[in-house]
Amino acid sequence: MESLNTKGVKFVACNNALMANNIDKYNIIHFVDTVPAGVLELVVKQSEGYAYIKP
């Protein structure tokens, strides 16, 4: 992840998921930002032209 981050890849974590799993956002990797809701972030990114591919 660090290598990808240095190449410009942005990582975000869902704050709702962090709270549901009792994880403090200060305990995740320093370059990972948080968003209020992961589902909303997916909708916004898709409206910007990104594609969501679920394995």
Image (tube, rainbow, N blue to C red):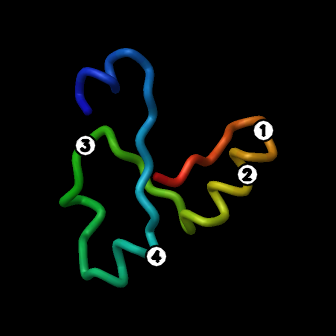
Front-most of residues 23 and 47: 47
Question: Which residue, given by chain and number where applicable, does mark 1 sit on?
Answer: 48
Mark 2 and mark 4: Cα distance apart in space:
17 Å
Q: Residue at x 33, y 24 (%)?
A: 4
**Viewer-nearest of discs 4 and 1:** 1
Disc 3 or 4, which lies upstream in sequence? 4
The image quarter in which residue 36 lies = bottom right
Kindly state the secondary structure of the residue where label 2 is placed: helix
The image quarter in which residue 41 lies = bottom right
Question: Which residue, given by chain and number where applicable, does mark 2 sit on?
Answer: 44
Mark 3 nearby-residue class (10 Å; few <14, some 14–19, many ≥20): few
Residue 16 is tagged as 4
55 lies above or below 51: below
- Contact flag, marks 4 and 1 (Cβ < 8 Å): no
Residue type, numbered disc 4 = Asn
Residue 34 on image: x %, y %: 44, 56
Residue 36 is tagged as none
Mark 1 and mark 2: Cα distance apart in space:
6 Å
Disc 2 or 3, which lies upstream in sequence? 3
Residue 26 on image: x %, y %: 24, 59
